[in-house]
Amino acid sequence: MTHEGTMKVKRTRKNTLIQEYKMFKMLLKESISDVQKCFRLVVNHLLALGKTFEREKLNVKFLNGINRN
């Protein structure tokens, strides 16, 4: 319990990560590799907290978040 935190802490962390997921965008000087690592990190943390995703929606979210310049 101490290591994992209380339900309030978990809920707050999950809400923060969901906000990061929703606002996901590639920064101007960021490489595709860096963006992919960041996206995977957020998704993996959400999965660990019980959030589920459809693979297709993850792919679309990632592709919509990257710059195509």
Image: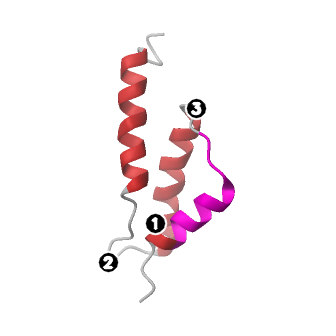
Q: Which is more foreground, mark 3 or mark 2?
A: 3
In the rendered structure, does residue 44 fall within the stretch colored magenta? Answer: no
Q: Which residue is mark 3?
A: 50
Q: Are marks 1 and 3 in contact (CB under 8 Å)?
A: no
Amino acid under label 1? Val
Q: Examine the residues drawn in magenta and state their main secondary structure.
A: helix
* Residue 68 position in % (x across, y down): 45, 85
Q: Which is more foreground, mark 1 or mark 3?
A: 3
User: Residue 58's quadrant in the figure?
Assistant: bottom right
Instruction: In the rendered structure, find residue 35 and report the number of the disc placed on it.
Output: 1
User: Residue 60's quadrant in the figure?
Assistant: bottom right
Identify the image quadrant of the C terminus: bottom left
Q: Which residue is mark 2?
A: 28
In screen coordinates, is 65 left or right of 19?
right
Amino acid under label 2? Leu
38 relative to 12, above or below:
below
Residue found at x 61% / y 41%: 52
User: Residue 15's quadrant in the figure?
Assistant: top left
Observer-nearest residue: 6 or 23?
A: 23
